[in-house]
Image (cartoon, grey):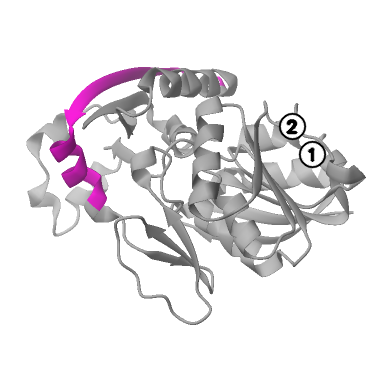
Amino acid sequence: MKWTQIRVTCKTEHIDEVAAVLTMLDTGVMIEDYSDVLTSLRTVYGELIDEKILRADKTIASASIYVSDKKTAEEDVDFISSRLASLGIKAEIATAELEEEDWSTAWRKFYKPTKIGKHIVIVPSWEKYEKQDGDIIIDMDPGMAFGTGTHETTRLCATLLEENVKSGDYMLDVGAGSGILAICAYRLGADYCAACDIDPVAVKTEKENAKRNGCDIDCFVSDLLASVKIKDGRKYDIVTANIVADIIIRMSSDIGDYIRDGGLLVVSGIIDEREAEVRSALEKNGFDCEKSLHDKGWCAMLCRKK
């Protein structure tokens, strides 16, 4: 099998947002950012830094994902290009082909069963895992090019879902990517789960992942909230949006229309530096932000509709 590397190069200050866009397609993102290399020189490991890295342009960085030949890399390139354009980020997108052996040694060894929250365990399909009492196993395959759901933003959202999803809830995931959050909510007891994404390839993968995990999830194409419906006249009890700060801010004036009074909104894909900005937009549009979680520079927030 062959793989295609999709490499996005941008100004260093935009690398977190670029990486966040790529995680919508695959959480196995490889980042090349040498902006802090001078800090490393002051450590005991400074002498081990390659000379090429020392000479690298510190003002630019890149992030890459890998797509199998079972999928069309051009569709992912178009998706990335449109998302970056909507964010006003200028970047160069390049592709390169790799053989299966090169790709498998580059990423598979880094994916292991990962426990998030108290009970949810993400298990790559090729890994063996001995289930413990109370475990909720989610079976994911990064070979599907949409990741295992172990990125920091996904883990933070799943943790908040585990703490708040109740039996009988109606749940919606906007910009769902792999569908991992809707799968988590379904396995946690939600009665009805919906997952939408602007990318038809993502929606196809959502359906495959839902079937893999025995979950009945309504998956459909939607440009953010454009095609979202209120099922049975009942607004959602909990909505998740693991996207990026700018898109969450853009949705903040409309997303409350789909959530019942007292219902919950879980947002992530937010770098720590933009937490206050996102919080302010949500509070101005009828939400109380009750809890924030942080992990490696990323933030997730739990908000309640007033």
Instruction: Pick the residue in front: 90 or 204.
Output: 204
Q: Is residue 281 left or right of residue 244?
A: right
| Label at residue 255 | 1
Report the amino acid beneath label 2: Leu
Residue 272 magenta-drawn?
no
Q: Residue 239 shows which numbered tag?
A: none
Q: Is residue 264 left or right of residue 114?
A: right
Q: Please, is residue 155 above or below residue 67 in the view? A: below
Instruction: Point out the image quarter for the C terminus.
Output: bottom right
Q: Earlier in the sequence, mark 1 or mark 2?
A: 2
Name the residue at 56% across, 34% down. Answer: 203
Indicate whether residue 102 is drawn in magenta: yes
Corner quadrant of residue 62:
top left
Residue 89 in view: no
User: Residue 96 is drawn in which quadrant?
Assistant: top left
Whether tag 1 and tag 2 are in contact, CB under 8 A, the answer is yes
- In the picture, the quarter occupied by the N terminus is top left
Q: Answer few, some or many: residues within 10 Å of disc 2's Cα (few below 14, many 20 plus, some between 14 and 19).
A: some
Give how far across and how far down residue 149 sits, in percent.
Answer: 46, 51
Secondary element under disc 1, as helix, strand or loop, is helix
Q: Nearer the viewer, residue 140 or 16?
A: 140
Q: Secondary structure at mark 2?
A: loop
Q: Residue furthest bottom?
A: 133
Magenta residues, start to end? 88-108
Comparing labels 1 and 2, the label whose residue is closer to the camera: 2
On the question of residue 214 being in view, the answer is yes
- Residue identified by numbered label 2: 225
241 relative to 44 in the view: left or right = right
Q: Is residue 48 above or below residue 291?
A: above
